[in-house]
Image (tube, rainbow, N blue to C red):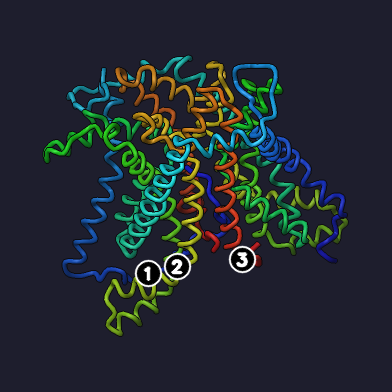
Amino acid sequence: MSQTLVKPAALPKTRPTADLTAPGRGPSRYAVWIALLIVAIAFLLPFVWLIVASIQPGAALSAHIAWKFSARNFADVLNVDTIFRPMLNSFVISAGTALLTVAAAVPAAYPLSRYRTRFGRILLYTILFSTGLPITAVMVPVYTMYSQFGLTDSVPALILFMAASSLPFAIWMMKNFMDGVPVSLEEAAWTDGAGWLQSLRHIILPLMVPGLTVVFVFTFVLQWGNFFVPFILLQDPASQPASVTIYTFFSTYGQVAYGQLAAFAILYTAPVVLLYSALSRVFGGAFGLTGAVKG
Amino acid sequence: MSIATAPRAARIGAFVPALLLLGVFFAGPLIWSVYSAFTDVALTGSATVDFVGFDNFTTLWHDAQFWNSLWLTLIFVVGSAVIGQNTLGLLIALLMRGRAKLTRAVVSGLVIAAWTVPETVAGFCWYSYLHRDGTLNGILGWFGLSQNWLYTTPMLAVILANVWRGTAFSMLVYQAALNDVPPELHEAAAVDGASAWQRLRGVTLPLIRRSIVTNLMLITLQTLAAFGLIYVMTKGGPGNKSSTTPIYMYQESFQFYKLGYGTAMALVLLLIGAIFSLIYVRLIKVDDL
């Protein structure tokens, strides 16, 4: 999933659409059906061999179906070195990054959402601008800097960089969620003499649990799949996340043991797919993320 | 009671954690990169780093491989994002309007599934799909069209894979945009006897124009620095036939240990990204912030 700039607060409006693009009669109706069928098949096909190979013992890259199925491949990769440690590393890195990102984004989003100042506006533009910068390109200088200070192969240092690179988009999302909490709710608290920190903690945050969840899960999912950053910054296999070890596995055994690679890939993908579908069920399609791409 | 109750110091204090992280780990490397692009810093561990002025950029200018990589990046961005994802996403969104719920769920479920898998896994899927004895050749073999796609047409291979992986985003953007097009306008045009194509060109497309431009900017920015997918599928090969600028930058920096040279390349890539990003920021209305 890519990092994208969308306004999360607004859910896509569903309107009962009269079918107008394609008249619901005659041959064009079938044409649409056939086109959609082709799309569905085209998107399904690349998955097929990965899924089939995972349950075929001894499957290689060649797509030859032997009508023999077993969970052998899964059993073969379910051990500490192949799956459990890398997945645990992935979890620590992704969850750590997501936590840190949310923790830093909340206080930064608050003034941006509540006060209209020149400084805030400039900051918002800068944040928006930085979400567009290609992280891949930053990695060479980041590596130079990290090796200069002896920070390569350090998981906390990796998390700090990942959190920093997720922050612009997280602040942007968080601000949009915060905009959805009416100021009037806070005013009562202010009259009672509460400071902004108190009203943030006791009034806004409880109302923003869905927003916090979305930002957390979004960051988590993005970092779970992040390959390039840990690939560059972590050399020690013992601390590498699954996104990197699965690549090592692929380049070492991919040709001969594609079935095992497929099983590994499915186990590695499952958590993000589950998280994604759980969240989109609660918040609407695509987390309700694409509700309003501003423009 | 006015909104501005918090003292100025507290307001600025709220930014401290974020600014600290961004300053040290984001802006820091950027500034560092400007410096090291002018040095001969290398991975070989030589203790002295010399200031070499514009040497890296002069080399870059005369490096045919670099220009080749920029050209391939352009092909990749235009082919997979601007043409592929954008058109296909719009097409799917248009075709799905008014379809039965089940149809929509199945089609968009599959398209989104391709989007949610991590990029390495997407790479494995396409590697085996396009492999000499892979699924695609198995099907095309019936028509006598099978070939080793990753070898004969590496750019087409990575472009198709990226279209597959990224279309969901454009589709979701256009689904949302199309939902905001009032059906009355279509009805009026239909009553006036406009064909489906005329309604699309005359009514729908002008109304979602801003979404199209925004979408194009966003997917360009996402595609510009794509690394994992291409690296898993072809490693830039065969030869340098699919070595886009991020791949070439990686190879020069980490396989040939020329970090200073790689950083110069990174700066060029950042500059291109910055230009698109600026255009994107300009597109967003100030009032919306």
Q: From this viewpoint, is residue B118 visible?
A: no
What residue did someone put label 3 on? B285
Tell me residue A67's x, y (percent). Answer: 17, 25
Lateral position of residue A229 relative to residue B73, left or right? right
What residue did someone put label 2 on? B208
- The reply to whether discs 3 and 1 touch (Cβ–Cβ < 8 Å) is no
Above or below, B106 relative to A241: below
What element does badge 1 sit on?
Answer: loop
What residue did someone put label 1 on? A17
Q: Amino acid at mark 2?
A: Ile
| Callout in the foreground (3, 1) | 3
Q: Could you tell me which chain the residue with mark 1 belongs to?
A: A
Tell me residue A23's x, y (percent). Answer: 25, 71
**Of residues A42 and B214, the one drawn nearer to the viewer in this rendering:** B214
Could you classify mark 1 by the number of other residues whose Cα lies within 10 Å: few (under 14), some (14-19), or many (20 or more)?
Answer: some
Q: From this viewpoint, is residue B164 visible?
A: yes
Cα gap from disc 1 to disc 2, whole angstroms: 16 Å
Q: Could you tell me which chain the residue with mark 3 belongs to?
A: B
Above or below, B161 relative to B121: below
Q: Residue at x 53, y 45 (%)?
A: A3
